[in-house]
Amino acid sequence: MILGVVLALPLFHDMSLWTIALMAFILSPTDAALGQPVITSPLVPDKIKEAINVESGLNDGIALPPVLACIGALSSVASERAGIQYWIGFTFKQFFFGPLLGALVGWLGGSLVEYAFKKGWMNPTFQCLAAWSLALMAYALAEKFHDNGFIAAFFGGLMLGVHTPAVRERIHEFGEAEDQQLALFVFLLFGLAAVPEAIQHWDVKAWAYAILSLTVIRMLPVAVSLKGTKLSRFSVAFIGWFGPRGIASVLYLLIVVNELGLKGYERALSVIVLTVLLSVCLHGITAVPLARMYAVHAADDGADGHAVS
């Protein structure tokens, strides 16, 4: 996030600092769905796959709070409510009360699903569908109290109170399948609606930042964070490269449009669209070849090569 802001400053003099920060924050979360051949490949060590997958799952929730803070600062009514009392209340509701409500719904709802399973009251089909209901309930309950529904749903999934392996496996498999279906649908709408509107704003600076976002801004922090893990350079570069931008960035972009509108933010949003489009193409094309290349280089990885099957 920090590097994304720093490298954007000299490129976009016409944007405010808050707008630049918003753009960088939206482009920080990754989407493992675009690298499914990597996540599922038997040629890639388990710990590498888990690192990419877990990061993708966690950083959606990590990125959302600063995105919301930027939206709050850029809001047209920010000047009217920018007092310390407002920001304390905003922080408490968004980042404490909302997650608490979501966690409660996930834990209690999952516990009820497991109880119904043990009593024979719920068949496998409805066990699979339960996760959808709980996510919507967590979202709706949080929004009812003017908290953030996305964060609530995120914490609801983290705290899902299901411990029976059979039920957890059903919910997981159904969730993975529906995730892929909805992701494809979102990318279809993204290509039909967002890309044509953004093309007119793509200049050299937009292309430069989009490429930097997928390379230096992503890969340098990954290399620093993996220092001392004894992974080979290829493994570090592999993890760094597979930081696709996808659903999370599109979702946050839609939140910005809903909250702030398009006027005045066309340039920043067009850079986000371009970066996601490049990621869809480049990470999609390279996923299979690089997964195969890993088998060649895995022997040099003393720390992770043993996980190759």
Image (cartoon, grey):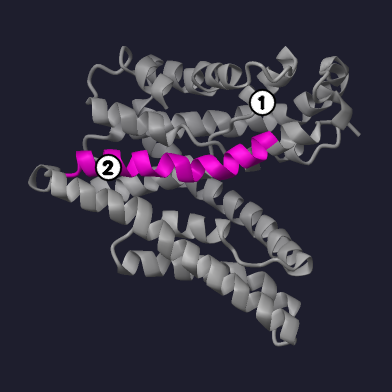
Which residue does the image show at 38% across and 15% down from the upper left? 7
Does residue 227 lie above or below 173 as drawn?
Answer: above
Residue 65 lies in the magenta stretch? yes
Residue carrying label 1: 239
Rendered location of residue 47, percent (x, y): 75, 34
> In which quarter of the view is residue 66 placed?
top left
Disc 1, SS: helix
**Segment colored magenta:** 51-76
One can see residue 108 in this view: yes
Which residue does the image show at 53% across and 50% down from the upper left? 186
**Quadrant that contains the C terminus:** top right
Residue carrying label 2: 71
Position of residue 85 in the picture relative to residue 96 (left or right):
left
Does residue 299 lie above or below 250 as drawn?
Answer: above
Indicate the amino acid at tag 1: Ile
One can see residue 149 in this view: no
Rendered location of residue 25, percent (x, y): 40, 33
**Front-most of residues 182 and 109:** 109
| Magenta span: chief secondary structure | helix
Rendered location of residue 97, percent (x, y): 35, 59
Rendered location of residue 194, percent (x, y): 42, 42
Which residue does the image show at 53% across and 20% down from the upper left? 221
**Outermost right residue:** 309
